Image: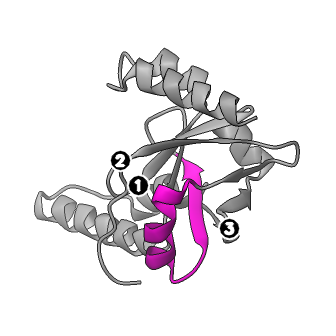
Amino acid sequence: MSGVYAYSGSGISAIDDKGRLSVPAFLRKDLIASSDGRTVCVGKHEKWDCLVGFGLSRKIDMLADIDREENNAIARGEEYDRDLASFKKFHSIKDLNFDASGRFGLPDGHRAMGNLNDKVIFFGTGLTFCLWDPQVLLETTASIPVDKDEVRRLVDELGKKK
């Protein structure tokens, strides 16, 4: 499980009536390696109106980030609320198992948290990847430099698979 994993690329998945979706193939290899198995961690993104995903090893990195932030605050003579920092990073994270085809169930609360309806666009962002509702993403492009044509292409691609 040690090592650095970089998530890049984009893909789309439908959400079925039971709330199941599939991690796209381009993400699965790194997810499996970073989790020592088929686990995806999913939670509310701290800044954007979407969900964030990653492998289990990222949780260790998040704890190290909190340690670093705390040490930097102490060095500056500032107070640091470790509990608040931990809450912000971890409160919504769920560890979810996925099968060999990448399929996993997304809890209803997370689906609502991410404003996800019937489709999910996955965008790699380096240490993590984002799970966006296509329409929400299209409406957010003023603050996130995503290619609208790419979003539309992915939605069209999913429509052709049905």
Q: How is the image coloured?
A: one colour
Query: Where in the figure is residue 134, as x and y percent of width and height?
Result: 58, 27
What residue is shown with label 2?
A: 125
- Extent of the magenta region: 24-44
Q: Identify which residue, 81 or 146, lies in the foreground.
A: 146
What residue is shown with label 3?
A: 98
Query: Where in the figure is residue 46, as x and y percent of width and height?
Result: 46, 43
C-alpha gap between disc 3 and disc 2: 21 Å
**Residue kind at label 1, given as amino acid type:** Thr
- Mark 3 vs 2, N-terminal side: 3
Circle 3 Cα neighbour tier, 10 Å, few/some/many (<14 / 14–19 / ≥20): many
C-alpha gap between disc 1 and disc 2: 5 Å
Which label is found at residue 128? 1
7 left or right of 99? left
**Residue furthest toward the left?**
76
- Mark 3 vs 1, N-terminal side: 3
Circle 2 Cα neighbour tier, 10 Å, few/some/many (<14 / 14–19 / ≥20): some
